[in-house]
């Protein structure tokens, strides 16, 4: 927690993305009753969203499951997977939170700072914060607020389907993050980056 509190000051919440030709998704699974961490990275061409390259890495799990400290459990395998990728992504989507975190330093932010790459957190469930009513149509979103601070967006990526929780990871502003998630989720609830990574991590 102390390390998160120190590193969060390095998170850049402004848009410093540059030209995006490749986007990546990250997902993590576990084997042998949690003893092995399996991290998958899928790199897709943008805007085609076609798979360009992928890497899957298995590493011994050396940190227990503790809510709010997910990065310490998953990041070693994720970083090893990125080390195997030759087509470096311009933007990374993480299946988890960025600044929508009790200490404003979720796994998407931690990864972004360590890799010095723009990242966006796209989570399926809320970790912290509250929000108002959300309209049913695709593209609708409302702020996710915690302790008076807007920490993310609750975004409807598909009409009538449960929303996702979007937040800045690193070097991406919130409104831009919402636009990028919509651009990379043309058909389904989750971005194609996440869908590809999840498929690889679960395979």
Image (cartoon, rainbow, N blue to C red):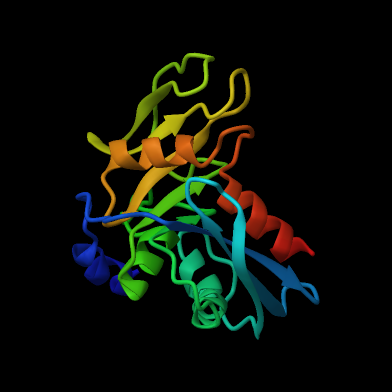
Residue at screen point 49% across, 78% down: 79
- Where on the picture, by quarter, is residue 2? bottom left
Instruction: Give the quadrant of residue 65.
Output: bottom right
Looking at the image, how many numbered discs can be counted on the residues? 0
Res. 108 visible in picture: yes
Which quadrant: the N terminus?
bottom left
Q: Quadrant of the C terminus?
A: bottom right
Q: Is residue 7 above or below residue 100?
A: below
Q: Nearer the viewer, residue 187 or 79?
A: 187
Q: Position of residue 37 (x, y in %)?
A: 66, 76
Judging depth in this view, the residue of 77 and 132 nearest the camera is 77
Q: Position of residue 36 (x, y in %)?
A: 71, 79
Please name whichever residue, 77 or 151, is drawn nearer the observer in this view of the structure.
Answer: 77
Residue occupying image coordinates x 44% and y 71%: 88
- Looking at the image, residue 78 lies above or below residue 95: below
Q: In this picture, is 29 found above or below 32? A: above
**Along the horizontal axis of the image, is 132 left or right of 125?**
left
- In the image, residue 61 sits, relative to residue 178, either above or below, namely below
Percent x, y of residue 137: 52, 15
- For the point 63% across and 32% down, the residue is 187
Residue 84: x and y in percent read 55, 82
Residue 147 can be seen, yes or no: no
């Amino acid at each position: 927690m102390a390390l998160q509190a120190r590193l969060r000051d390095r998170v850049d919440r402004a848009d410093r993305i540059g030209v995006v030709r490749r986007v990546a998704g990250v997902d993590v699974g576990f084997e042998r009753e949690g003893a092995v961490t399996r991290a998958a990275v899928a790199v897709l061409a943008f805007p085609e969203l076609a798979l360009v390259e992928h890497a899957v890495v298995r590493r011994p799990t050396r940190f227990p499951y503790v809510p709010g400290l997910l990065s310490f459990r998953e990041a070693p395998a994720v970083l090893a997977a990125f080390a195997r990728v030759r087509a470096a992504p311009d933007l990374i989507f993480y299946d988890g939170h960025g600044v929508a975190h009790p200490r404003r330093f979720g796994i998407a932010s931690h990864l972004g700072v360590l890799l010095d790459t723009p990242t966006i957190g796209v989570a399926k469930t809320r970790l912290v914060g509250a929000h108002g009513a959300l309209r049913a149509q695709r593209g609708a979103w409302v702020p996710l607020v915690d302790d008076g601070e807007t920490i993310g967006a609750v975004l409807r990526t598909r009409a009538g389907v449960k929303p996702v929780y979007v937040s800045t990871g690193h070097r991406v502003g919130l409104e831009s993050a919402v636009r990028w998630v919509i651009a990379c989720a043309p058909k389904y609830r989750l971005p194609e980056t996440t869908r590809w990574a999840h498929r690889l991590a679960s395979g």
